[in-house]
Image (tube, rainbow, N blue to C red):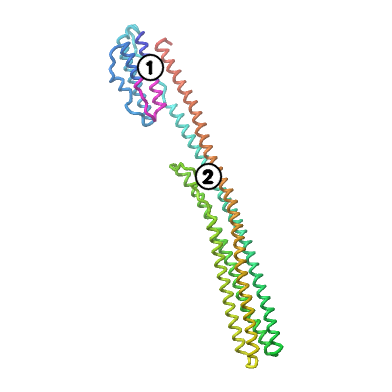
Amino acid sequence: MNSIIVYILMLKTVLMKSQFIWNDADSDVSTDGMEYEMQYFFEAEVGPFNKSHINEFYPTRKPRSVKNAMEETKQYTNNIKDVIAAALNNDKNILFSGSFPGPTIVYPPIGPIVDLVSAAGDKITTDIHTAITTQLAVINTAITTYSTTTSTKAGNAINTGLNNLQYDIGNLFNTVYNTLATSVNTIISTASTTSGTNIGDASAQLLADLQTAFATASTGSQAAVTAMGTATASSVDAAITSSGTALYSQIESILADTTNTDPIMPQLTFLDPTAIQTTITTGAADLSNTITSLINAAQRSMDTIIANSIAGQVTSETTALNVIATDVKAAINTQVTTLLTNLQTTITDDTNAIKTAVDTILTNNLATLTTSVTTALTTIDAQIAKAVNTTSAQTIKDVQAAITADGNIMKTQLRTIFVGP
């Protein structure tokens, strides 16, 4: 009976050892306590214990994989059966009346439990991949919506602002033209009363030439406004579209980098409204320089026209024409100075209005995009936790059930060995 007790205790140690190997396949497992327990009962009930036997079935290193763990456990259980059989050999005739067959236990295979754990890993991986793929699609849709909406609204705001700018500049030119026409008519009318028909003809031609020169500047200025608007809208549209693409690439790259464990939002770089503002401001400054150049050129052209008109007049009209020239130049200088001042103010005000409108659109749409991206990333995190927790909980239940079933199988075999069928 003592030998039977030893057998049961050593079998208990075998089962505990197997359980520790599978539960801690990736961590160091201390087996000293079990070794001492086996040696103590062996020597107390059977006789001197050769420790070399126990070293054969105690692995000296931790398993590096499930496969290694299975092989080492198999070797362990086979060796321990030999040790137990040898321990009982002296008493076998007493225990089994001379017909000792040797205790044999068929251990349930570990494969099904390994399959349960492996399947859990596959399910977690699949669930996480599905969550990431789904939320990346959500992020991509949010970025596409942001890019399209922002580009469209910003383009509309810019077009509206440029239309206002063009209208305001047109009004300024019309005001200058009407004022100059009135001034020239007044000057010519005054001179005509004393200079006769020749001065009347000369003044009419002079007025027509001056209006032509000024119309050239006006047409050029309108064209410059249109060109600036087209270029600015194109640059802003390209910048917004590019920023959306770059943002998606950042998120995709961060999610693909398994070594990057930092929060995602602080790593993202969004569109810098300063770049848009710089584009608009630069375009406005260039427009102002272009219009100023056109006006100054028109002024020089009108000076030449006036000089040529004076040179072509007959000697008798020289005095009258000189008076006209002086007065017309003075009127032109006054109006050009006023026009340039008003143009600068108008361009500055209308450009600021465009920048404000675009900034508002960018701020609102960036806030919406940020919320969408944050929500998607939070969803990914929650679904990862759900996948791991749910699958792990189910795996624990399945493995526990499998181990319990294996234990029942081994208990049945032990009952057959020690008690009988």
- Provide residue 152's location: percent of width, then percent of height: 60, 56
> Observer-nearest residue: 272 or 254?
272
Q: Is residue 214 above or below residue 398?
A: below
* 344 left or right, relative to 37: right
**Residue 152 lies within the magenta run:** no
Instruction: Please provide the residue range marked out in magenta.
Output: 16-33
> Looking at the picture, how far across and down is residue 155, in whole percent?
60, 59
Tell me the residue at 70%/85% (across/down): 190
Q: Position of residue 266 (x, y in %)?
A: 50, 46
User: Do residues under tags 1 and 2 come within 8 Å of each other at their CB atoms?
Assistant: no
Q: Amino acid at mark 2?
A: Leu
- In the image, 212 versus 203, the foreground residue is 203
Residue depicted at 46% across the width and 29% down the height: 116
Residue 11 is labelled as 1
Q: Is residue 30 rendered magenta in the image?
A: yes
Which residue is at a point 47% across and 32% down the rendered structure image? 120
Above or below, comparing residue 319 to residue 50 in the picture: below
Q: Position of residue 150 (x, y in %)?
A: 59, 54
The answer to which of 177 and 24 lies nearer the viewer is 177
Give the image quarter of residue 373.
top right
Foreground residue among 302 and 33: 302
> Disc number at residue 136?
2
